[in-house]
Amino acid sequence: MPLQTFRYAVCGGSNVMLDIFLFYISFHYILKQEPLNLGLLVLKPYNAALIMAFCITFPLGFILSKYIVFHGSYLKGRIQLFRYGIIVAINLFLNYALLNIFVQYLHIFPTISRILATIIIVTFSFLSQKHFTFKMEGNKRG
C-alpha cells in the first residue's frame, strides 16, 4: 500500500470515526432524537446531527489532509481550502441524500445509515482530494 494511501486511510478513517461518534452523540444526547427548530427552519434530528458533526470534522479533515496526507501539493493553501470545500460540499450533499433515502425510505436506523453513506462516499473523496484538491507535482496537468 502506498504511503499516501495509508496516511489517507489513517487520517481519513480517524476523522470519519470522529464524525460518526459526533453524529451519534448529537443525535442521541444533544438533540435527543428530536427535530431542531431554528425558527424559520426545522431540521430532522439526523440532519441536524450531520451538520453538527460537520462543523468539527471539516476543519480537522482539511488540516490532516493538507499537512499529513497530501503535504507535497504545489497548490496554495487558499486554493486547497476552496477546492476542499467544494469536494466536502458535494460529499455533504451525498451524505444528506443517502442518509434521507436510507432512513425515510429503507427504514434503516440513522447511525447505521450514516455509516453506509460514508462507505459509499470514501472512494470518491480520496480520488477527488488526490487529483483535484491537493494536486501533486506529478499531476500538474491543467
Image (tube, rainbow, N blue to C red):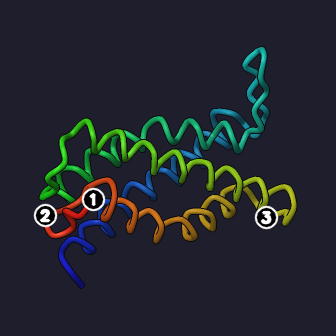
Earlier in the chain: of badge 2 and badge 3, it is 3
Q: What residue type is labelled 3?
A: Ile
Q: Residue furthest front?
A: 142
Residue placed at 31% from the left, 46% from the top?
62
The quadrant in which residue 39 appears is top right
Q: Quadrant of the C terminus?
A: bottom left
Q: Residue furthest top?
A: 39
Q: What element carries label 1?
A: loop
Q: Name the residue beneath numbered marker 2.
A: 137
- Does 24 sit above or below residue 30? below
Residue placed at 69% from the left, 33% from the top?
31
> How far apart, in angstroms, are the residues tagged by discs 1 and 3?
42 Å
Earlier in the chain: of badge 1 and badge 3, it is 3
From the top left corner, tell me how far across and down residue 104 is, in percent.
85, 55
Q: Is mark 2 on a helix, strand or loop?
A: helix
Earlier in the chain: of badge 2 and badge 1, it is 2
Q: Name the residue beneath numbered marker 1.
A: 142
